[in-house]
């Protein structure tokens, strides 16, 4: 079938099966080869009954496989339930969506955000839906194929730039989606907009181990309970440096927010008793959960927030929201932020962000209302807090609004069950190419004292996720937490979020297992191998060539890594074994088993493996200076560490050196000093 005939058949089928007042059109991507943004200027266009202005059928290029990013359940349809669903063709995708019970949030509307296609082994395509100041677009898989709808989800006539999509290509799915995001951020439809991850500042408190109240306490919060927890946090085996007070503290009535201050029956003296417990040696930061609309029922009509007078409108009986203008939204978010900052709150987690879109839907212009709200929120946190954690915010309409906030929840809520854990692992890693270009990804709280506690700690360490528990501090299994942190609670982190390698990105993990990679200093590629899905033993493999994927998520992206001239050393964290990586490696994993393998370049005969008691072993040592005759290292904390040397047993003053195996040496400093530096010489 010729391309032109295929276009005609697509168009006819689309025309017949599209029962709207919109004119049937198509966007032909079958022969494109360079990155581009598609957006149109329109004048005085009336949205249809759903709030859309245009609808286009997508004609895709030939592809081998793909990933479709969309919400997969109705309850929080455009919140944290975003999943990249793999497919070989559109019939396969429909089957997979059916097996996931992926109900549409609106009739015949998927609310899809991105499509990533594997054209062949060395060419990938990223296709990203757009969200501007006053209009947006979204994907739906219909009987006729993928459709792109664009509009306001409002009722008023629209004039302006109607953003549709961007597309781009790369030699990995990561590169293709990065270029698609970079292209999207040039849109004329944007005023306030997100930025690439490298252009944002990662919050300091997320560099440390933390605690969240939600899974542990739910809404059973009060001064006495949280005071006790904070004291336990300071006295813990590893200090827990921040506490997030989640839902349950608010002053509410029938799910409507009454006041910014906490419920006086639970916190009679406000937050002061908790804030007074903050110290350099214990809990340094306290965070607070917010519902973006105030609370689940919005702001109460009888609220006590005087500044909001004349700045709210009644969406439904006693359900008040900020009016759809910048002044009203500024007053709401800035007022709350100022009051909470003055009360001692250091950062906020803002939840149910995508619900704002659903609440304003059917008003004059829902997208403009969302833009007002997010711009106000971004200004408020930047003026008053150390950071913002975005939650239930995975829909691209929201992601485009995160101007400077650098962290986003990338999964559903963590719960203590195996099905949830296996799902979360794939969701987080697949979301890396969608959400990870503009944010660091938060894998949510976890429970250490569970059989997946160790693997949960590992994946968060590999992925650069915040690390925080939600269980009694006395129940925390610090033996699995210690390999992720230093003794002061600081986390060892990669240079970029962990991601899946291209070979497994588009495959069912039940068949392939999970193969994730993250970059460490010194061009170390760290791989995390896991079997979270198959009841049968799975064989997972690595080759020396896989090293090239180490830098796929680094920004600015500089391409695939080349093989080091002197070769690679592989180090298995779990067994403590090291070997020269000059042939393929394989391991067999039972369900819930994992492996951490570091691929470390050899340079001048040296390879620094680092502290064997840390998941990210090479990240524990900084190479200050190196030559064939000596190497100078710096460690945040002294302790036994491993080096590889091709030239015989090394020596260092005030240490003991033991040969562990061929070319592998364990060096034990005779000190437990902090900020420790050591010079190691060739024998």
Image (cartoon, rainbow, N blue to C red):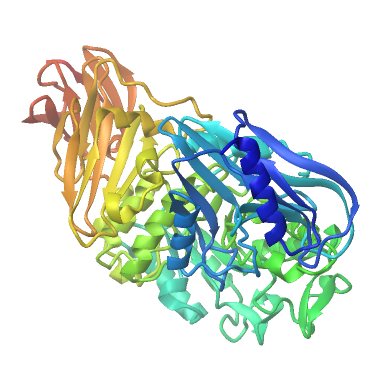
Res 302 visible: yes
User: Is residue 293 toward the left or the right of residue 617 in the image?
Assistant: right
Q: Nearer the viewer, residue 533 or 378?
A: 533
Residue sitting at x 56%, y 71%: 74
Give how far across and how far down residue 101 sits, in percent.
47, 70
Q: In the rendered view of the protein, which quadrant contains the N terminus?
A: top right
Q: Nearer the viewer, residue 526 or 348?
A: 526
Which residue extends farthest top?
A: 628
Give how far across and how far down residue 196 sits, in percent.
60, 39
Query: Looking at the image, is 551 positioned above or below residue 512?
Result: above
Q: In the rendered view of the protein, which quadrant contains the C terminus?
A: top left
Give how far across and how far down residue 296 sits, in percent.
65, 77
Res 465 visible: no
Residue sitting at x 36%, y 43%: 492
Residue sitting at x 35%, y 71%: 416
User: Is residue 16 toward the left or the right of residue 1 in the image?
Assistant: right
Q: Quadrant of residue 659?
A: top left
User: Is residue 47 toward the left or the right of residue 676 in the image?
Assistant: right
């Amino acid at each position: 079938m010729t391309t032109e005939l295929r276009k005609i058949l697509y168009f006819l089928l689309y025309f017949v099966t599209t029962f709207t007042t919109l004119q049937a059109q198509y966007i032909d991507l079958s022969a494109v080869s360079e990155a581009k943004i598609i957006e149109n200027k329109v004048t005085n266009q009336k949205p249809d009954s759903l709030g859309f202005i245009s609808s286009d059928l997508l004609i895709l290029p030939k592809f081998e496989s793909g990933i479709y990013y969309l919400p997969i359940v109705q309850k929080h349809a455009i919140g944290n339930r975003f999943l990249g669903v793999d497919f070989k063709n559109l019939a396969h995708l429909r089957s997979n969506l059916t097996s996931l019970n992926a109900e549409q949030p609106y009739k015949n509307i998927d609310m899809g955000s991105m499509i990533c296609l594997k054209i062949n082994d060395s060419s990938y395509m990223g296709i990203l839906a757009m969200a501007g100041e006053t209009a947006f677009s979204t994907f739906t898989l219909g009987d006729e194929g993928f459709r792109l709808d664009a509009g306001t989800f409002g009722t008023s006539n629209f004039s302006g730039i109607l953003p549709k999509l961007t597309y781009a290509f790369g030699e990995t799915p990561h590169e293709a989606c990065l270029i698609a995001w970079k292209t999207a951020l040039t849109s004329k439809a944007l005023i306030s907009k997100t930025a690439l991850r490298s252009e944002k500042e990662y919050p300091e408190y997320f560099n440390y181990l933390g605690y969240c109240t939600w899974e542990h306490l739910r809404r059973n919060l009060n001064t006495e309970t949280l005071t006790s927890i904070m004291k336990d946090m300071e006295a813990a085996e590893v200090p827990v440096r921040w506490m997030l007070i989640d839902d349950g503290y608010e002053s509410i009535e029938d799910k409507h927010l009454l006041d910014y201050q906490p419920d006086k029956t639970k916190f009679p003296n406000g937050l002061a008793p908790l804030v007074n417990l903050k110290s350099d040696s214990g809990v340094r930061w306290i965070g607070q959960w917010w519902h973006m609309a105030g609370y689940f029922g919005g702001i109460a009509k009888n609220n006590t927030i005087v500044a909001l007078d004349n700045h709210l409108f009644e969406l439904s009986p006693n359900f008040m929201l900020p009016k759809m203008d910048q002044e009203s939204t500024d007053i709401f978010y800035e007022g709350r932020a100022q009051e909470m900052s003055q009360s001692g709150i250091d950062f906020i987690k803002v939840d149910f962000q995508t619900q704002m879109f659903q609440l304003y839907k059917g008003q004059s212009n829902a997208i403009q209302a969302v833009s007002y709200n997010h711009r106000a929120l971004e200004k408020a946190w930047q003026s008053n807090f150390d950071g913002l954690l975005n939650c239930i915010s995975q829909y691209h309409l929201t992601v485009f609004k995160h101007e400077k906030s650098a962290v986003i929840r990338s999964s559903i809520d963590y719960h203590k069950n195996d099905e949830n854990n296996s799902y979360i692992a794939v969701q987080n890693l697949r979301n890396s190419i969608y959400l990870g270009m503009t944010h660091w990804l938060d894998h949510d709280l976890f429970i250490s004292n569970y059989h997946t506690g160790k693997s949960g700690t590992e994946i968060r360490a590999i992925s650069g996720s915040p690390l925080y528990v939600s269980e009694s501090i006395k129940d925390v299994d610090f033996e699995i937490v210690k390999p992720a942190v230093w003794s002061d609670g600081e986390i060892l982190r990669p240079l970029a979020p962990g991601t899946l390698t291209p070979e497994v990105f588009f495959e069912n993990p039940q068949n392939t297992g999970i193969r994730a990679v993250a970059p460490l200093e010194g061009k170390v590629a760290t791989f995390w191998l896991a079997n979270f899905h198959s009841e049968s033993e799975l064989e997972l493999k690595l080759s020396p060539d896989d090293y090239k994927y180490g830098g796929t998520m680094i920004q600015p992206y500089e391409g695939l890594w080349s093989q080091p001239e002197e070769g690679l050393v592989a180090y298995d964290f779990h067994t403590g074994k090291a070997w020269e990586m000059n042939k393929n490696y394989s391991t067999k994993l039972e369900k819930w088993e994992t492996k951490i393998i570091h691929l470390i370049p050899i340079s001048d005969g040296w390879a620094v493996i680092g502290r064997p008691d840390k998941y990210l072993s090479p990240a524990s040592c900084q190479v200050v200076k190196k030559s064939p005759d000596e190497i100078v290292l710096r460690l945040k904390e002294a302790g036994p560490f491993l080096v590889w040397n091709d030239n015989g047993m090394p020596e260092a003053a005030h240490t003991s050196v033991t040969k562990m195996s061929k070319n592998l040496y364990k060096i034990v400093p005779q000190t437990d000093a902090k900020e420790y530096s050591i010079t190691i010489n060739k024998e």
